[in-house]
């Protein structure tokens, strides 16, 4: 193997390592999202932050849960994901801009 090929391989490896490092650092800064889900809960509805097991708030009616989720999503520039009674997604409202 010539010296130019060996040095080229090291450069390729170094570039790949740097790309992996920067890609992983960008992902860790993103962290968790603030998206708010309106989900069926017991006899009513709940607002739950994406990724959380615990609910943020419980409501008897879906429209009050949606209003609460909208307030939170506006505050944190996130989305509201509204689910149907069967758990499927009905609508998504974007407050990220």
Image: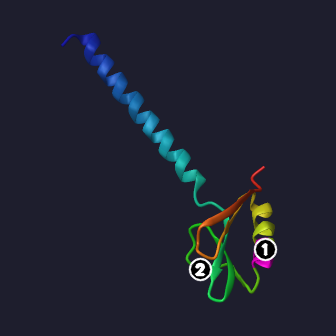
For this rendering, which residue is in front, 6 or 78?
Answer: 78
Which residue sits at x=62%, y=88%? 42
**In the rendered image, the vertical position of residue 2 relative to residue 9, given as above or below:** above
Tell me which secondary structure the magenta stretch mostly adopts.
helix
**In the rendered image, the vertical position of residue 62 relative to residue 76, given as above or below:** below
Judge whether residue 91 is colored magenta: no
Q: Nearer the viewer, mark 1 or mark 2?
A: 1
Q: Which residue is mark 2?
A: 54
Q: Which residues are magenta?
A: 62-66
Residue 72: x, y in percent?
Answer: 76, 68
Residue 87: x, y in percent?
Answer: 58, 72
For this rendering, which residue is in front, 52 or 70?
Answer: 70
Residue 14 visible within the image: yes
Which residue sits at x=63%, y=60%? 33
Say which quadrant the N terminus sits in: top left
Q: Residues within 10 Å of mark 2 (few under 14, many from 20)?
A: few
**In the rendered image, the vertical position of residue 56 relative to residue 82, given as above or below:** below
From the viewer's perspective, tell me whether residue 49 is left or right of residue 64: left
Q: Which residue is mark 1?
A: 68
Judge whether residue 63 is colored magenta: yes
């Amino acid at each position: 193997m010539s010296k130019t090929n060996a040095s080229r391989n090291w450069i390729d490896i170094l570039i790949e390592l740097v790309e992996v490092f920067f890609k992983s650092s960008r992902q860790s800064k993103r962290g968790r999202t603030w998206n708010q889900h309106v989900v069926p809960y017991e006899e009513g509805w709940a607002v739950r932050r994406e990724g959380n097991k615990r609910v943020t708030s419980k409501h008897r009616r879906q429209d009050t849960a949606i209003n609460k989720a909208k307030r939170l999503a506006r505050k944190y520039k996130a989305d509201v994901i509204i689910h149907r009674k069967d758990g499927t997604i009905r609508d998504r409202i974007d407050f990220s801009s």
